[in-house]
Amino acid sequence: MEQNENTKPNLSSLAIDSQARDRAGSSKSLIIGLTVGGAALLAVFMWLVLRSRPISVQVASARTAVGNEGATVLNASGYVTPRRRSTVAAKITGRVKEMLVEEGMAVQRGQILALLDEADARASFSAAQADREVTRASIPGLQANLKEGVLTLQRMRELKQDGYTDQSTLDRAQASYDSLQSQLEVAAKQVASASSRMAVAQREIENCTVRAPFDGVAVSKDAQPGEIVSPVSAGGGFTRTGISTIVDMASLEIEVDVNESYIAKVIPGQKVEAILNAYPDWRIPCSVRTLIPTADRQKATVKVRIAFDALDAKILPDMGVKVSFLAAPGAEGSRPAKALVPREAVRDSGGQAAVFILKDGKLERRVIGLGGSRGDDVQITAGVDPGEQVVINGPASMADGQKAVPEKK
């Protein structure tokens, strides 16, 4: 037993020297530090290389704010509407015999648009005419009988006066005379009644011809030959209530709804610039024609009608339009725009509106003064001159002084 205890191994000889362990830790920390430092130097080097390389940006030229009477005080949107638009309908119920109008056709006042079947109206006219002629033919006989009745009445009066006849005979002669006179008056009234029915039938014949109420352009054709038309809705979907819709193109104007909170900025005669959605690069000079003197309590808006200074064939009813109400020149708070730039060129930089200008191959950040909107453009009152190249699309990391080249289209 003692021999086994003496032969047990001594493990204390396997302990690591503390000085050696400290030297190894210091070497590892040095390697990590050198690695991190090298990565940082490489990142700085790459940043400098990338910064020195020009970036590609999309640019657009700032345009002169031509025709700007003053700063925009209010923007709104609406539609082109005609003051005179009419859905022409027949005055009577009838079957369409012929349509003489097509969409897009220019029509003049009184021009025939459609013809209705007039057979029934002509039959009524012929019947009334026949009744009148029959009654007229009976009048001469009644007049002759009345003349004879006058003579008989006179004789009966003389005979009664001389005592050769009694009172009852005189009374019968008087009644015969009164009856003949009444029949003649009835015949005359029947002739007048038949003439009136002829006039009504003639009017119905004329109503079978549908005419344009004013000069304009037909924008719809609402009936076809063989269909029944009526001035009132009847027969469900089988009866048309209109023949064609006519628009007076000379009465086109713009109708917009302005929030009642801003209606004080709008006055009759105020200059307005309009941009049709169909032609975003076409700025149309207009002016306020009238403010409708009532508000819509549901939408809290007031309707404003705007007149075009000059009409154009490209302006069509129901086109969408954006309008800018302009301040009067020299009005307090109005500042004329120097240039127009696309809306996407303007950036928020620390609470300030700014743009990047591409000049001499470098980006230049400029704080600008903003005016009103003009469709997809905004007015610039300060900071940009017409003709300068503004950046409308580029990397989010753009910086002042950075090299850049315009993107090739």
Image (spheres, rainbow, N blue to C red):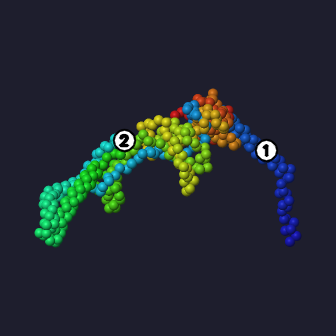
Local crowd size for mark 1, using a 10 Å CA cut-off: few (<14), some (14–19), many (≥20): few
Q: CA distance from mark 2 to mark 1?
A: 95 Å
Q: Is there any visible trace of residue 253 in the rendered image?
A: yes
Residue carrying label 2 = 215
Look at label 1 and name its amino acid: Leu
Nearer to us in this view, 352 or 226? 226
Query: Which residue is found at the position 84% from the left and 68% from the top?
Result: 4
Question: How many callouts does the rendering have?
Answer: 2
* Circle 1 SS class: helix
Q: Nearer the viewer, residue 209 or 263?
A: 209
- The quarter of the image holding the N terminus is bottom right
Q: Which residue is mark 1?
A: 30
From the viewer's perspective, tell me whether residue 169 is left or right of residue 4. left
User: Quick check: 5 left or right of 250?
Assistant: right
- Res 51 seen here: no
Disc on the earlier residue, 2 or 1: 1
Element carrying mark 2: loop
* Up/down of 135 relative to 286, above or below: below
Q: Nearer the viewer, mark 2 or mark 1?
A: 2
Q: Residue at x 44, y 45 (%)?
A: 83
Residue 359, percent from left and from top? 63, 29
Displayed quadrant of residue 334: top right
- Amino acid type shown at disc 2: Asp
Q: Residue at x 49, y 40 (%)?
A: 307
Residue 8 placement, left or right of 231? right
* Image location of residue 143, percent across then percent down: 15, 58
Farthest residue, direction left = 164
Q: Which quadrant of the structure image shows residue 167?
A: bottom left
